[in-house]
Image (cartoon, rainbow, N blue to C red):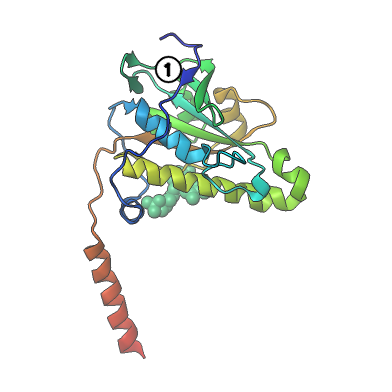
Amino acid sequence: MSFGERIFLPYPRKITVMSVEEAILLRRSYRSFRSDPVNIEHLALILWSAYGISDPVNLFRVSPSAGATYPLEVYVAIGERGVVDSTGFIPAGVYRYEPYTHTLNPIKYGDIRRELARAALDQIYIEEAPIDIVVTAIYRRTTRYYGKRGEIRYVPMDVGHMGQNIYLMATALGYGTVAIGAFNDDEVAKVLGCSKEETPIYIMPIGVPREYRKIDFSDIKIVIENNRKKLLRSI
Ligand SMILES: Cc1cc2nc3c(=O)[nH]c(=O)nc-3n(C[C@H](O)[C@H](O)[C@H](O)COP(=O)(O)O)c2cc1C
């Protein structure tokens, strides 16, 4: 496959065996990744979990959005040998996720991970991860209905919902991620090649963590039990 072709992602389907409560328990921010590529089936499911369609009638998305205005755009920066399908590696570059067709639209050729990390205070895990999801907002879509409230409340809330979906699906598939908000907006926009009306909001590197966090519900039970004992002693 050469860069420039639209990628028709595998249809969303049930893959994971992890329960929601396990994914919530195991979710953590990971900042160190192996170089293992992300499988296209997994990337497709993560992108669908971010902003895919879950309502065939109204075309509503998996993430709630104020007034269903859907102000966000989702990009994935694929590194060299970052994503693999049955025929080989997907060409490195920036792709925009198009929810209605569940496709990746090629935007910019080449591996931008290093430049992206530079634009984000040299947070090197952005370069280390095989892929980075970048979320941008087109505020106007929401502010035209809700004014300032749309900008300072609703759009950030929408991004939070999406971010958590990405965290949880990445966890359930055996990957790790971290929500990154510290970066230079203009530089990220330039590196990404998005339109002028878009503001970058999140960068989420995704990859197999170098070390998985081990935790069980029994560990949480112990902490809660101890806290309860302290509470009972204090009253
Ligand atoms: C809005 C927001 C911005 C964040 N920005 C960064 C960031 O720029 N760099 C980073 O390493 N982590 C960032 N984080 C991740 C937090 O540091 C992390 O969620 C927090 O330490 C709690 O850890 P946990 O996610 O493992 O529960 C951000 C999280 C949020 C919600």
Q: Could you classify mark 1 by the number of other residues whose Cα lies within 10 Å: few (under 14), some (14-19), or many (20 or more)?
A: many
Judge whether 190 appears above or below 88 on screen: below
**Identity of the residue furthest to the bottom in this view:** 235
Left or right of residue 86, residue 155 in this image = right
Where the C terminus falls, by quadrant?
bottom left
Judge whether 225 appears above or below 205 on screen: below
Left or right of residue 223, residue 77 in this image = right
Secondary structure state at the residue bearing disc 1: loop
Q: Which residue is mark 1?
A: 92
Left or right of residue 79, residue 101 in this image = right
**Identity of the residue furthest to the front in this view:** 57
Q: Position of residue 105 (x, y in %)?
A: 53, 20
Identity of the residue drawn at 44% across and 18% down = 111
Q: Quadrant of residue 86?
A: top left
Asked if residue 124 shows in the view, the reply is no
Identity of the residue drawn at 34% across and 16% down = 89
Identity of the residue drawn at 29% across and 40% down = 174
Q: Position of residue 124 (x, y in %)?
A: 39, 33
Q: Amino acid at mark 1?
A: Ala
In the image shown, does 168 or 54 lie closer to the viewer? 54
Picture mark count: 1
Where the N terminus falls, by quadrant?
top left
Asked if residue 86 shows in the view, the reply is yes
In the image shown, does 111 or 142 lie closer to the viewer? 142
Identity of the residue drawn at 29% across and 27% down = 35
Q: Position of residue 55 (x, y in %)?
A: 55, 42
